[in-house]
Image (cartoon, grey):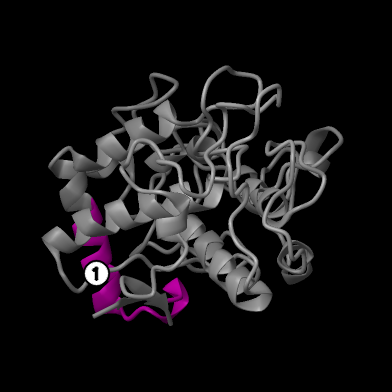
Amino acid sequence: MAYVRRDVSTLTSAERRRFVKAMLEIKRRGEYDEFVRIHIEHYVSDGEGGLRTAHMAPSFLPWHRKFLMELEKALRRVDASVSLPYWDWTRDRTASSVPWTSDLLGGNGRSWDRQVTTGPFAYRTGNWTLKEGVTDGEFLTRDLGRRRDPIALPTKSDLEWALSDPVYDVSPWDSTSPRGFRNKLEGWGSGRGSAAWRTHNRVHRWVGGAMVGGASVNDPVFWLHHAFVDLQWQRWQRRHSPHRYLPATPPGSGHSQQGRVVARHERLPPWDVTPDQLEDVSRVYRYG
């Protein structure tokens, strides 16, 4: 029977406690840090060589869908009642709203070093020491809204801009793709500065701290953010059926993306699953 992913703002106090407890337990077991390592390993940009799966590629959405499902499996081994909530950042838009509460994810980082000092994932609790990352920092950091150079979270109209595109993705299948739902939702815009960060990417920048870069999984909000992104893929699928994941076949000889992107029926590393198999997950979970 499919389980339900719910809006984090609707969770009861008991449900919040169970979610936090399960997260802390998989961190204690060392399982959580493996998820951080996987994301760092697969955070490959346009400018690097080799296969891209997690970002700047058509497989951005199925890759993270599978990633969230694996995290959920780990949580549900601890507590079968737990599933990932999602954070609707078009509605809960301030540093004092859900999920930035002391009983859930804790609040903003302090001004001088961005260290999160409130909530269950604060370094001082002793339960959330960062062990995998691109720096040597051991504590979780945030800069909600960016104090020195403020930016706003994406709006409902920003989401609609992505959702209204009926084509999943287009060549050249990277961060420069001029059209397509995937790149509009992932949020690689043109220009410099904050104008270049849209939708999904802008949320990472708005949270700041650990959420910027390949080690963004170190902040538990990563999962709530990506659950909401995954929900947008489901909404796009319903709106634009029968449009599907693209490319359907691998880019041909001489194409700049040959061997660099995953086609619909190709294996999606590091798992033995294809984008085609991840397009319908209704038997696993649904959104409430």
Q: How many marks?
A: 1
Q: Place residue 229 in its image quadrant.
A: bottom right
Residue nearest the observer in this picture, 6 or 137? 6
Q: Is residue 47 above or below residue 88?
A: above
Residue 162 percent location from the top left of the image: 74, 61
Query: Is residue 96 in view from this perspective?
Result: no
Q: Residue at x 33, y 30 (%)?
A: 37
Residue 202 percent location from the top left of the image: 67, 48
Q: Is residue 19 above or below residue 256?
A: below
Q: Residue at x 46, y 75 (%)?
A: 7
Left or right of 25, for residue 114: right
Q: Main secondary structure of the magenta part?
A: helix
Residue lying at the far right in this picture: please name it: 191
- Span highlighted in magenta in the image: 5-23
Residue nearest the observer in this picture, 273 or 66? 273
**Amino acid type indicated by mark 1:** Val
Residue 232 percent location from the top left of the image: 59, 67
Q: Is residue 145 above or below residue 196?
A: below
Q: Is residue 14 magenta?
A: yes
Check the picture and name the quadrant holding the C terminus.
bottom left
Query: Is residue 108 in view from this perspective?
Result: yes
Residue lying at the far front in this picture: please name it: 253
Which residue corresponds to mark 1?
82
Check the picture and name the quadrant holding the N terminus.
bottom left
Q: Is residue 37 magenta?
A: no
Residue 182 percent location from the top left of the image: 66, 52
Secondary element under disc 1, as helix, strand or loop, is loop
